[in-house]
Image (spheres, coloured by chain):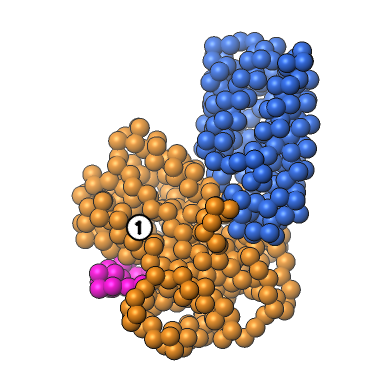
């Protein structure tokens, strides 16, 4: 394993120190609690948005802290959910009097720790907390026999859209309902071409042959559901989109926000090529793309591969999408 | 009867055990999870070991603090689960200086109930509960048969190990391994493995 690290156990704190140094005008980092704050948080009267999760998915979530997106992000160890203390500290610090929304990806650890944090925040300080759990990954059958669908690409779109709504001053109940609606109207599916290596583990999480890819991969190097023979990008795009389109609730002619996300180890050249395949397929299916996003936004360390997310859009969502955002990982109009 | 010193010894032994087993647990977790169970448990139990020089009025306050420390340092699903276990374990032991076999039994039951409540697992879901449930039954049986807490914990650890091994063929229905579906079969559950280590450590030290 070759990585640009010192000691595996210092990776997260040292990266946070770098992040604080690189973005002094926009961010404030609490190294003890491993929380990244928007510099001007708490914003009086604005609903506070707190997310977080294991590190190793950068720019998510810390890179999405700033104007028009998150107020705070809690950084766990690599691929390990943060702990309730971090979340409670973040919740209290960003409460501008309008309450706080927790944006949680559906992984057992994240859900349990955020649950404990919300209980603690309510008991200790009376901050009103609402929670949205994202679960957009169609690779996972939503049945009683799994922990439910995982939260993946929709989390990025949701943080942008809900961030804009909170910035406009919409109240907590509205912001939380919007978050739920966004989660329900977005679907994702991913694939991996290589494994990643968790620094503390020191070797690849799984092995994939040169002639294979893993369909339905998660974002933690956890293997997907199915290992298949490698195929041209056109066929890979079809295999990603088919289960998404099967499941995406939308009415005929309704546009989508299309998001091709890199897992960290795939060049933009290939991601744009994949976007081209995705848009060709959507065009044939008479699904207009009203907005799009291509790049590495919810990554899995250096894993090669990508995911595709489609989010059904309406006028309000497009208005929120176009609103100014100024974060290290996403920036336009500001 | 186990005194507070024995519990201190247990938590110290647990930290050492987890440090030594770190790689093995992470290997189990790589197969069906996300390759962090070993480092998480080692980090959390090491933080607990740092408490042991401090003064605690009784065993219960030591165990409660240990639980809160695990919640604050482990992360993932294991943090809330093991943290809740120790916090609840402390409940029935409040105010006790010497813990009897029966009292520890009641505490273990409270701890495991906490794990169940937090994790909502059922038998056969391929989780740590598949080690906890037979361990608790074996402990109670041993105490009913007249064993003191040391030998009863030995029986519990043995039953936990059998429960751990029995998770091998199961298809996971909880946690990250559940996403693998059928492919999760053929691998031991890392949580059941760490639970077995925890009970083996208890059997070595609490007597």
Q: Nearer the viewer, residue B54 or B163?
A: B163
Q: Is residue A124 left or right of residue A136?
A: left
- Residue A331 within the magenta-colored segment of the rendering: yes
Q: Which chain is blue?
A: B
- The x, y position of residue A43, in whole percent, is 25, 51
- Residue A123 within the magenta-colored segment of the rendering: no
Disc 1 residue crowd, few under 14, some 14–19, many 20+, Cα 10 Å: some
Q: Nearer the viewer, residue B2 or A20?
A: B2
Give the answer, above or below, for where B64 lies relative to A47.
Answer: above
Q: Which residue is mark 1?
A: A180
Q: Is residue B18 visible?
A: no
Residue A303 occupies quadrant: bottom right
- The x, y position of residue A165, in whole percent, is 26, 61
Q: Residue at x 34, y 36 (%)?
A: A122
Q: Is residue A72 left or right of residue A194?
A: left
Q: Which residues are magenta?
A: A312-334
**Quadrant of the drawing holding the C terminus of chain B:** top right
- The x, y position of residue B147, in whole percent, is 77, 15
Q: Residue at x 74, y 26 (%)?
A: B138
Q: Nearer the viewer, residue A214 or A73?
A: A214
Residue A221 occupies quadrant: bottom right
Visual hue assigned to chain A = orange
Give the answer, above or below, for where B59 lies relative to B41.
Answer: above
Q: Is residue A72 left or right of residue A11?
A: left
**Quadrant of the drawing holding the N terminus of chain B:** top right
């Amino acid at each position: 394993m070759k990585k640009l690290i010192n000691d595996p156990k210092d990776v997260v704190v040292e990266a946070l120190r770098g992040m604080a140094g690189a973005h002094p005008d926009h961010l404030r980092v609490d190294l003890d609690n491993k929380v990244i704050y928007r510099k001007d948080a708490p914003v009086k009267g604005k609903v506070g948005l707190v997310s977080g999760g294991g590190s190793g998915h950068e720019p998510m979530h810390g890179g999405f802290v700033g104007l028009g997106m998150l107020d705070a992000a809690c950084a766990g160890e690599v691929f390990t959910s943060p702990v309730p203390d971090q979340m409670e500290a973040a919740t209290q610090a960003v409460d501008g009097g309008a309450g706080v929304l927790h944006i949680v990806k559906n992984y057992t650890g994240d859900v349990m720790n955020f649950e404990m944090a919300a209980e603690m925040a309510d008991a200790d300080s009376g901050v009103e907390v609402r929670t949205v759990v994202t679960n957009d990954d169609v690779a996972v059958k939503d049945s009683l026999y799994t922990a439910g669908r995982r939260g993946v690409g929709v989390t990025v779109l949701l943080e942008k859209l809900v961030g804009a709504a909170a910035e406009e001053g919409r109240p907590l109940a509205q912001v939380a309902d919007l978050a739920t609606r966004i989660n329900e109207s977005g679907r994702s599916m991913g694939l991996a071409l290589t494994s990643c290596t968790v620094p503390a583990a020191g070797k690849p999480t799984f092995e994939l042959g040169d002639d294979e890819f893993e369909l339905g991969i998660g974002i933690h190097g956890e293997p997907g559901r199915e290992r298949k023979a490698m195929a041209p990008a056109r066929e890979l795009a079809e295999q990603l989109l088919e289960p998404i389109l099967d499941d995406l609730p939308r009415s005929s002619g309704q546009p989508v926000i299309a998001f091709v996300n890199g897992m960290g180890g795939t060049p933009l050249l290939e991601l744009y090529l994949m976007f081209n395949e995705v848009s060709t397929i959507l065009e044939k299916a008479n699904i207009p793309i009203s907005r799009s996003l291509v790049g590495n936004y919810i990554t899995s360390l250096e894993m090669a591969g990508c995911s595709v997310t489609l989010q059904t859009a309406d006028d309000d969502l497009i208005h929120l999408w176009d609103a100014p955002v100024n974060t290290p990982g996403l920036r336009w109009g500001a | 009867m186990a005194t507070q010193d024995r519990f201190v010894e247990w938590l110290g032994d647990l930290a050492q055990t987890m440090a030594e087993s770190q790689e093995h647990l992470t290997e189990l977790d790589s197969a069906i999870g996300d390759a962090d169970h070993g480092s998480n448990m080692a980090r959390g139990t090491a933080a607990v070991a740092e408490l042991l020089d401090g003064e605690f009025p009784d065993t219960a306050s030591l165990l409660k603090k240990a639980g809160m420390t695990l919640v604050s340092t482990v992360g993932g699903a294991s943090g809330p689960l093991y943290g809740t276990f120790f916090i609840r374990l402390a409940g029935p032991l409040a105010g006790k200086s010497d813990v009897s076999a029966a009292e520890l039994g009641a505490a273990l039951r409270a701890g495991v109930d906490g794990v169940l409540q937090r994790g909502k697992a059922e038998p056969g879901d391929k989780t740590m509960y598949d080690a906890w449930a037979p361990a608790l039954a074996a402990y109670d049986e041993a105490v009913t048969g007249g064993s003191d807490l040391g030998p009863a914990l030995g029986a519990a650890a043995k039953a936990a190990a059998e429960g751990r091994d029995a998770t091998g063929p199961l298809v996971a229905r909880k946690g990250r391994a559940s996403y693998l579906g059928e492919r999760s079969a053929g691998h031991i559950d890392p949580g059941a493995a760490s639970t077995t280590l925890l009970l083996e450590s208890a059997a070595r030290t609490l007597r």
